[in-house]
Image (spheres, grey):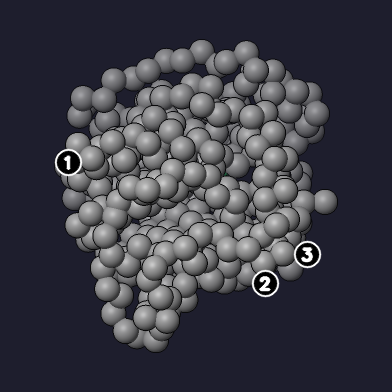
């Protein structure tokens, strides 16, 4: 279970660990027996054996536990990444995933999700309202339609036609309070058509306490990869805004020959560099998982000179089982679950929040 204040508390606790890391400790990819040199250059990446499950933030612990159980019970890695993040979607105390998420500026919760398998098959839904499990609709889009992505009212109608029930949830008191407070502080930027102010607002939206999307990437005992990503997106976004999380290549990318990556943070930054795809391609070129994540973060920094206060974080899992994560600012952590380990890891980072 997680909520904003728990996570803020977590971030504070995490500072000690991340400071130690800056001093030179490893974040986890070095723990794996596979030698990164093995994959330098164009050498094929030898498939590893899972289970290895990674997911973003502390809510990943419960999601990973479910995904692990699914694999133990003989489920596929696709079942695992779907059912894992469903735990987070059903946690209505979570203010950034699922129906409990913070609303957009109009007070409406809109959800984005996607899923991809070892062979690159993919499904996605964007800007959907009043469904508990957008990840399952995304999977159904992948399995039952010739398309990859459905959005908005069309996605909702298709979901209902395909057996997904609408779910109405009143906005939680604390979420309403946050929204009311945001409205009170931002009376002018609610005026439609004022793009300069909207930009200022978006800067503010991408801040420290506003990122909790769950992205999950996993490798099973047969060497098969899969990934999932689900979110209510940035709080108080413009109604209609879609982030990176449902976009294959931005919020998630899986290539069974190389590895998988997922992203969290300001989606606009991720979309503009096709972030998760970039991380996988960098691994294909021989970078170790954490290095691939760091290069993607550095690319975002290079492309956005002078930008401050926007968090982005990536996770990467290579086909041989090596893994890593990296974020722009400190405070990003990820959950790891294997046959022998079940823990939260502070990701390495480029900068410290001031
Ligand atoms: C988005 N990437 O909609 C998401 C937001 C988020 O952790 O909070 N990610 O841009």
Q: Of 285 and 320, which appears nearest the observer?
A: 320
Q: Is residue 94 above or below residue 341?
A: above
- Residue 59 in percent (x, y) is at 50, 35
**Disc 3 to disc 2: CB gap under 8 Å:** no
Sequence order check: which comes first, mark 2 or mark 1?
Answer: 1
Q: Which mark is residue 74?
A: 1
Residue 36 appears at what percent x and percent y? 43, 76
Residue at 72% across, 64% down: 23
Measured in 3D between alpha carbons, the distance from the residue under mark 2 to the one under mark 1, in whole angstroms, is 44 Å
- Residue drawn at point x = 46 percent, y = 24 percent: 91
> Looking at the image, can residue 259 be seen?
no
Tag of residue 302: 2
The label shown at residue 306 is: 3
- Give the Cα distance between marks 1 and 3: 49 Å
The relative height of residue 244 versus residue 38 in the rendered view (above or below) is above
Asked if residue 19 shows in the view, the reply is: yes
Q: In this orientation, which residue lies closer to the viewer: 73 or 232?
A: 73
**Residue at 53 percent of width and 45 percent of height:** 344
Question: Is the residue indicated by label 1 positioned so its CB lies within 8 Å of ligand 1?
Answer: no
Disc nearer the start of the sequence (1/3): 1
Q: Dot 1, crowdedness within 10 Å: few (<14), some or many (≥20)?
A: few
- Left or right: where does residue 1 sit relative to residue 123? right
């Amino acid at each position: 279970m997680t909520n904003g204040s728990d996570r803020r508390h977590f971030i504070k606790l995490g500072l000690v660990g991340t400071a130690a890391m800056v001093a030179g400790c490893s974040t986890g990819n070095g723990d794996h027996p596979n030698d990164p040199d093995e994959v330098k250059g164009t050498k094929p990446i030898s498939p590893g054996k899972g289970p290895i499950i990674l997911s973003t933030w502390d809510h990943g612990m419960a999601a990973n536990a479910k995904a692990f159980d699914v694999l133990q019970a003989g489920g596929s890695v696709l079942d695992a990444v779907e059912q894992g993040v469903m735990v987070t979607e059903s946690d209505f105390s979570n203010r950034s995933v699922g129906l409990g998420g913070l609303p957009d500026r109009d007070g409406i919760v809109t959800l984005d999700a996607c899923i991809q398998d070892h062979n690159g098959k993919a499904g996605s839904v964007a800007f959907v309202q009043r469904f508990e499990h957008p990840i399952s609709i995304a999977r159904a889009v992948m399995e039952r339609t010739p398309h990859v992505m459905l959005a908005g009212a069309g996605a909702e109608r298709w979901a209902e036609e395909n057996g997904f029930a609408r779910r109405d949830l009143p906005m939680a008191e604390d979420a309403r309070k946050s929204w009311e407070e945001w409205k009170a502080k931002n009376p002018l930027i609610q005026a439609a058509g004022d793009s300069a102010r909207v930009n200022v607002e978006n800067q503010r939206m991408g801040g420290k306490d506003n990122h909790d999307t769950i992205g999950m990437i996993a490798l099973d005992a047969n060497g098969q990869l899969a990934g999932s990503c689900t979110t209510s997106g940035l709080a108080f976004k413009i109604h209609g805004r879609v982030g990176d999380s449902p976009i294959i290549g931005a919020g998630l990318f899986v290539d069974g020959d190389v590895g998988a990556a997922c992203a969290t943070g300001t989606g606009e930054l991720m979309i503009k560099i096709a972030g998760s795809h970039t991380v996988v391609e960098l691994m294909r070129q021989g970078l170790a998982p954490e290095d691939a994540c760091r290069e993607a973060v550095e690319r975002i920094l290079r492309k956005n000179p002078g930008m401050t206060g926007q968090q982005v974080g990536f996770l990467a899992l290579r086909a041989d089982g090596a893994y890593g994560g990296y974020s722009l600012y400190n405070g990003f952590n990820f959950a790891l679950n294997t046959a022998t380990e079940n823990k939260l890891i502070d990701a390495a980072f480029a900068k410290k929040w001031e």
